[in-house]
Image: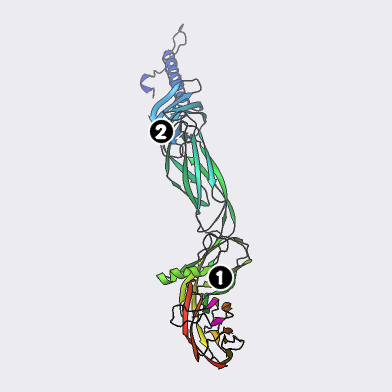
Amino acid sequence: MFEDDFEEPNYDMGPGDDYSDSGSSGGKGKFIGIAVVIVIVIAAFFAYTTFIGNQQTVSFTIAEMDGGAKAERLIVKDSSGTQVFSEKVSSTDLQLRPGRYTYTVSSLDYQPESDSFTVENEPYTVPIIKLIRDVSGTMDVSLGKTRIYEGETVNGTLTISNNGSTSIERLGLTGTSSIFEVIFSPANVSIGAGGATGVDFTIRIKNDISSPTEGSITFKLKGTMIGTSANLTANPAVPKSKVTIGKTTITDSTLRANQRKTLSYVLRNKDTKVPLESIKLEILSSPGLEFEQRLDWFEIGLYSDKKTTRLIDRIAQGSSEPIQIYVDVPVDAQEDDIFSGKLVISSPSMEENLEINMTLTVAEGISYGLTLTGALSSYTSDCDFEGCETIRTLDSRLKLKNTGKNQSLENVVISVDESSDAVCESWFEIVNNTIASIGPEESIELNMIITPLYEAEKNYCFLKFTYDDPISGSRDSILSRSLEIALNYNE
């Protein structure tokens, strides 16, 4: 490359001449130039690798706590405190030399965030910078129960207090759990400085479970550090097929009016793993006013406010509970009166309700009535000018009969009918004129005292019978046929 400038040395020397290289000074200069170029290249390479080639990509992302990306001013400084970046961004990539750095993000209504990081000889991603709302407060949780079953919904309440000097405006709520789903009402809250508010929520199990499982829920006011937690036990539900009372239907066609009948069953939990809890038994009528009115016949909850409802706290797995349904058929029920409805057994620990159809029929209505039976004999009385002898009958063969088949008559009173034309009070009296009770198809013989009127061949009287009406409860009266007594006189 130096051909043009190279001079061939002079090898011809005369006497007295000194040896010399006429091109030596020019060659040295060229070698010095080459060395300088090499030094410059090395220095440039060193500068590149030190100040440019060794820089690494550092990634930043700014987001709200529990929210999405948010653009705010990001300031980055190196270890000497020199600011190397300051812009409003939500994410960015910077080229930074290896070393120690600090960043700061500040924003109105948020707590300032600051941290340090080290860049080495590889790309680096700074952990997401999460901005936290500049508020303070507390959160308390109240649950209706701590055990929940598949398909069940449990209610609860969050009480959130704002302990800061600024208002909380429309912040959302979160309930985080791997097992449970939480729904808030309302979903956002606003709380004045120093105030508090309550938020209702519901919980249910997200997915099917096969065995009791402990789980927790983390409650939080979005974008803040205000939160709390709660623990619950998730239980599988008992299949309907494992809940029985020994009958698939409830039927009875032997009811009678004015009768109480007890229907006895055993409620069984055949599941060997899961208990039944908060069990409700309720009798419901089929559509129709007559069926609805006949719900009054039933009593299943002896100690409940509603006679047709009974509550049972718990039936352990593989256990049972006796139940009785009391049927009080009213006195005015008629033959072939029917109740149609169903017994519904429900529990939050059951997959679905068990419904048992009910049909109950009145076979016999109430039956009662009074009649006077038998015949009177002729009676003989000794008489003189002062009058006739009194006759006391112990066997008059005159009987009062209850013609009913299934109902007694109470408080029967026999008296003379004063409204009739016959005047018999002066000569006729019923001895056993008050009878406490006359049973179905029972007859009571009447005993009398007769004081004959002189020379009257026949004496007439009309009797009245009064009793407690079994249906209305009021006093009812029946007028008998006229009572005729034939008399013989001995003078």
Q: Where does residue 7 sit, x and y in percent of width and height?
A: 39, 17
Rendering coords of residue 238 (x, y %): 56, 64
The reply to whether callout 2 and callout 1 are in contact (CB within 8 Å) is no
The three-letter code of the residue at mark 2 reads Thr
What span is in magenta? Answer: 412-429
The residue located at (42%, 33%) in the rendering is 93
Look at discs 2 and 1 and give the one toward the viewer.
1
Tag 1: Cα neighbours inside 10 Å, few (<14), some, or many (≥20)? some
Q: Earlier in the sequence, mark 2 or mark 1?
A: 2
- Residue 419: say if magenta: yes
Q: CA distance from mark 2 to mark 1?
A: 78 Å
Secondary structure that dominates the magenta span = loop
Instruction: Tell me if residue 490 comes above or below residue 137 in the rendering.
Output: below
Which residue is denoted by mark 1 in the rendering?
326
Residue at the image point whose x is 59% and y is 57% from the top: 212
Where is residue 336? Give x, y as percent: 46, 80
Magenta region includes residue 157: no
User: Helix, strand or loop at disc 2?
Assistant: strand
Q: Nearer the viewer, residue 272 or 279?
A: 279
Quarter occupied by residue 71? top left
In depth, the one of 260 and 383 nearer the eye is: 383
- What residue sits right under mark 2 in the picture? 92
